[in-house]
Amino acid sequence: MSDNHLRLGVNIDHVATVRNARGGAYPDPLRAAKLAEEAGADGITAHLREDRRHISDADIDGLMGVLSVPLNFEMAATPEMQKIALRHKPHAVCIVPEKREERTTEGGLEVAREENKLAHYIAPLREAGCRVSIFIAADPSQIEAAHRIGAEVIELHTGAYCDAHAEGRMDAASRELESLRDMSAFAHSLGLEVHAGHGLTYDTVKPIAAFPEVRELNIGHFLIGESIFRGLTPAIAEMRRLMDEARV
Ligand code: PXP
């Protein structure tokens, strides 16, 4: 894989959302994950929420057993999630906010105010060999704090950019994009690996994919939605094509 390769992590949470709307076992997120792998996903992302609204504990057990690509395990910084992550030791964990008070205004994790707590929280995960990523807004103080606590990766929250774009607020979308570009470069200059995600679609992915410092995108809701219309494999293939095009 070339140095310029931009990894695509496919988030399968919303296959579980559809399954849980009826109860039972269909559609199976593990089947979607295997299909995503075959379609060229470089990794699978799943968020075990505290309220288990989509992905279940059994899904995580299953994913650990069947995947040949790395699992990126998204979780809130709670003792319960830490225990689960330490039991499975997934390739990567991404710490995300779940409660309002854990968020910065832009929606990422509030790291700067919780530095000590988070440093202690992620230390055992790193010792267990998990690559720790922190999901944050494009804000220099959050990036510096993520660096100080020992995270290896930050994932930049692209939600504000995507929302502005979807609502036709193009000036705001440009400003968000500029900030994401600057903050990707800033995080990279600190030695952090830079990922990005949330809300990305075919219409919004290319400018983000073009940032040379960004190594991975995590995309879920749009791809699962689009798969209703064109099937999961073609939906992923088109995203892959757009990412590669942006990277040239
Ligand atoms: N990255 C992180 C950290 C997430 O929590 C999520 C899911 O909300 C995503 C990426 C994927 O976002 P989406 O489902 O909107 O593509």
Image: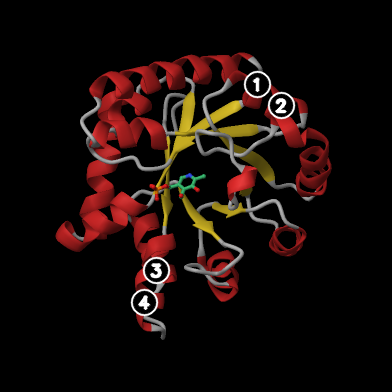
Name the amino acid type tagged 1: Ser
Compared to 198, does 232 lie above or below? below
Q: Is residue 153 left or right of residue 155?
A: right
Q: Which mark is residue 141?
A: 1
Q: Earlier in the sequence, mark 2 or mark 4?
A: 4
Label 1: few (<14), some or many (≥20) within 10 Å? some
Q: Residue 238 appears in which quarter of the rendering? A: top left
Residue picked out by circle 4: 21
* Residue 31 screen position, x and y as percent: 39, 70
Disc 1 versus disc 4: distance between alpha carbons? 39 Å
Label 4: few (<14), some or many (≥20) within 10 Å? few
- Can the viewer see residue 248 in this picture? no
| Callout 1–callout 3 Cβ contact below 8 Å | no
Disc 2 versus disc 3: distance between alpha carbons? 33 Å
Element on which disc 4 rests: helix
Disc 1 versus disc 3: distance between alpha carbons? 34 Å
Residue picked out by circle 3: 17
